[in-house]
Image: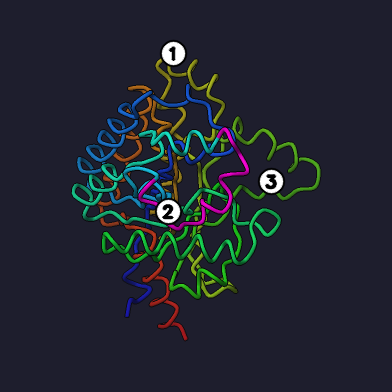
Amino acid sequence: MMNAEDRTGSFLLSLDTELGWGYFDCFRRELFSSGGQRERETINLILDTLDEFGVIATWAVVGNFFLNHHKEAGSSPIMDWKERDPVFEELYESDSPVLYGADVIENLLTRGTKHEIAFHGYTHRVFLEKTMSSKEARAEIQAWSNIAARKKIIPKTAVFPRNKIGYLDLFKEHGFICYRGEELMPGIATLPVVGRVFRRFYHFFSLFSTPVTYEPQVDRSGLVNLPSSRWLFGFNRRVERILDALNLHKLRIAQIVKGVEKAAENKQVIHVWAHPHEFQTPKDMEKLRYLLGHVREEIDKARLQSVGMAQLAKEAIALQGCKQ
């Protein structure tokens, strides 16, 4: 078992890989390239950058993305509800490359053997009781697990669509050990009046606030909660493009770098997340390289480790066992 003295800080990077499924209820074709080629090239660039710095990512993938086309779906949760939305039904049956990505999954498995593939819903529906029944939630989990099993993937990590967390008992029942909790915010966010203003304009204030770091804990669900510390692109994009044009793109990442240093110093976790399709310009990739360069420095100093979410959860469970 792991001893507390052996611990270092930990860097988590989770990538919500959903493409068109992330917009299943509000899809606009102009959001993506016509053949999905740009998005695939971006994923390759991200993989190249992860390889360069020796950083591990948790790729949270939508179940339908494992398919080549809709006819492979067979009996799946989507068959029960797609007819409710004629516009989406047409899109679903178009076999658009931004909805079906078996080639992307194969690429991740071939190039990213050290990375983790995590659950991100089968259809990207939200796991809340008002939008999904317990029966539907169970069907989503089972359908994802069945299709992932074809690639010998056994899911241990849940990253909830749109970060809406629910039905943790079902995930525990299906053998999951951890999930990504809601983004942590500085203490000021809890204040009655000022806190509301802070939360509303957090995408601006994040330029000046260091991400919250933490120690992983097993919560009441029996799962390890590994909340996000910062959404990499949770910043006003118009302002961001102005900063990019002024060559101040690294300024946007400065506080996250401070969070990395804080996690290394205090032997805590910093958890950054993004969508692959959000890396839209060379400056966006430079931000990732700048961040991972600092992560690599801390790894080389033996003050930080880069791991997948499930691996960190296993370490947390082992450490808790040592304390009991």
Q: Residue at x 43, y 49 (%)?
A: 62
Q: Position of residue 206 (x, y in %)?
A: 56, 35
Q: Earlier in the sequence, mark 1 or mark 2?
A: 1
Label 1: how many Cα within 10 Å (few below 14, some 14–19, many 20+): few
Q: Position of residue 84 (x, y in %)?
A: 63, 43
Report which quarter residue 97 is drawn in.
top left
Q: Which residue is mark 2?
A: 263
Q: CA distance from mark 3 to mark 1?
A: 30 Å
Task: Look at the numbered disc 1 and give the secondary structure of its residue.
Answer: loop
Up/down of 219 relative to 244, above or below: below
Q: Is residue 200 left or right of residue 123?
A: right
Task: Look at the numbered disc 3 and give the secondary structure of its residue.
Answer: helix
Report which quarter residue 205 is drawn in.
top right
Q: Residue at x 58, y 49 (%)?
A: 81
Q: Is residue 321 left or right of residue 24?
A: left
Task: Look at the numbered disc 2 and give the secondary structure of its residue.
Answer: helix
Q: Earlier in the sequence, mark 3 or mark 2?
A: 3
Q: Tell me the number on the disc at residue 188.
A: 3
The residue sitting at the bottom extreme is 324
Q: Residue at x 39, y 33 (%)?
A: 96
What residue range appears in magenta?
Answer: 71-87
Magenta segment main secondary structure: helix
Front position in the image: 51 or 16? 16
Front position in the image: 295 or 112? 112
Up/down of 311 relative to 39, above or below: below
Q: Tell me the number on the disc at residue 246.
A: 1
Q: Amino acid at mark 1?
A: Leu
Q: Position of residue 91 (x, y in %)?
A: 48, 34
The residue sitting at the right extreme is 193
Q: Amino acid at mark 2?
A: Ala
Front position in the image: 158 or 299? 158
Q: CA distance from mark 1 to mark 2?
A: 30 Å
